[in-house]
Image: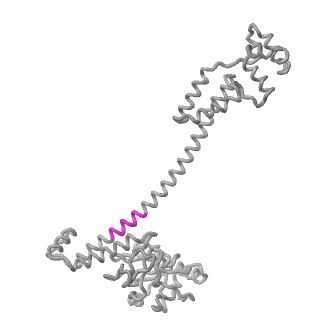
Amino acid sequence: MPKSTKRFTISDDRLNSHGFRMLTDGADISDFIANPIMYWMHVYPTGGKPDELLPIGFWEDIEQKDGKITAVPNFDDGDTFAMKIYGKVEHGTLRACSAGAEPKPNGLSVNPADMLPGQTLPTFTSWWLREASICDRGSNAGAVALRVNGKMVQLSDDASEVINSLLKNQKLDMKLTQLTAGGLTAMLAALKLNAETATEQEVTEEVGKLVTLTANQASAIHTLTTEKSDLEGKVTEVQNKLDAQVKLSNQTKIETLVNGAADARKITKEEAPLYVTLAHNHKDGFDAGFKQVEDLLEKKVGVPSVQDALKNGGESKDELSGLVKLSYDELFSNGGLTKLKALSPIHFEEKMAEKFPNRKAK
């Protein structure tokens, strides 16, 4: 079995990213030395699946000194997966390990003397090292697993629920020894235990169930919160796309209406943008604005073109035809502008626009 050339720090006295720390001097590593099992990411085999991940080796040269617990990993060369991890360790891809820890009774402290600046959770002053795992994140960066009621719980980004539940359990255990007979009877009744027949093991099991339930609920809340955030992000993305489609549809709708009115000579091309803006800026929204513009345009009568006027006849068709052929200057010099305006306002505006491009149509 190949022994690594790397020595790993399993735990030290520093404050980890969760906001708590585990004192090296308070660590009991006797069970770990007797059985220095090594897992990958605290994944334990249960025997329930034929392809489940088995231990990848064991730890050697275990040392507990200078505020650190360190050891050298030895990999199982009969396990293909273990050898892959060995290769990544030797190449420097994987450089971290994580402690599988369990606080001892009354092993958590919030005494200011045991706390460091910035520490938000209790200090583990007395604890067992149950195992150590090769992992992708360092133990002091947050990859810490805790044993709760006989089961390992890998901490999420927010470990406060689990750690605080352990602290509450510790305080409960301390209070149990101080309860009067009546108080103990009431507490056992709350746990649905018979005060006369309940054993210490039964009380411990029921309290442990409450602690495990609290930890599981905290994990479930974290998962649901993450899922809720993801769903809200997706809803926002879909809503933004829908809003963009509605905006594009509205723009196409109003432009079609206004351009149709301009083609029918109800309004000029220069007036068209004003009606588009009117629809979009209505105080009651686009639908109300569109209806207002639609009603306004329906009441307007289109001005016939010269060709239509000539085609349909009229008392002044010859005169109108002659006037349209003249330039603005010619009309101005012979007084034709007044006649043109009377016969066809739209043609009058066209002559004015030709002469004065920046003039706004009236």
What main secondary structure does the magenta stretch of the protein show? helix
Residue 43 is inside the magenta segment:
no
Q: Position of residue 157 (x, y in %)?
A: 46, 69
The quarter of the rendered structure image containing the C terminus is top right
Q: Position of residue 28 (x, y in %)?
A: 38, 88
Q: Is residue 190 above or below residue 361?
A: below
Question: Which residue reaches farthest top?
Answer: 315
The x, y position of residue 40, in whole percent, is 48, 78
Comparing 200 with 86, the one in front is 200
Q: Residue at x 48, y 75 (%)?
A: 17
Classify residue 332 as left or right of residue 65.
right
In the rendered view, would you say 357 is above or below 45? above
Q: What segment is highlighted magenta in the picture?
A: 212-222
Q: Nearer the viewer, residue 352 or 249?
A: 352
Residue 44 in sight in this render: no
Which residue is drawn at the image coordinates 45% and 77% (left, top)?
A: 144
User: Which image quarter: residue 334?
Assistant: top right
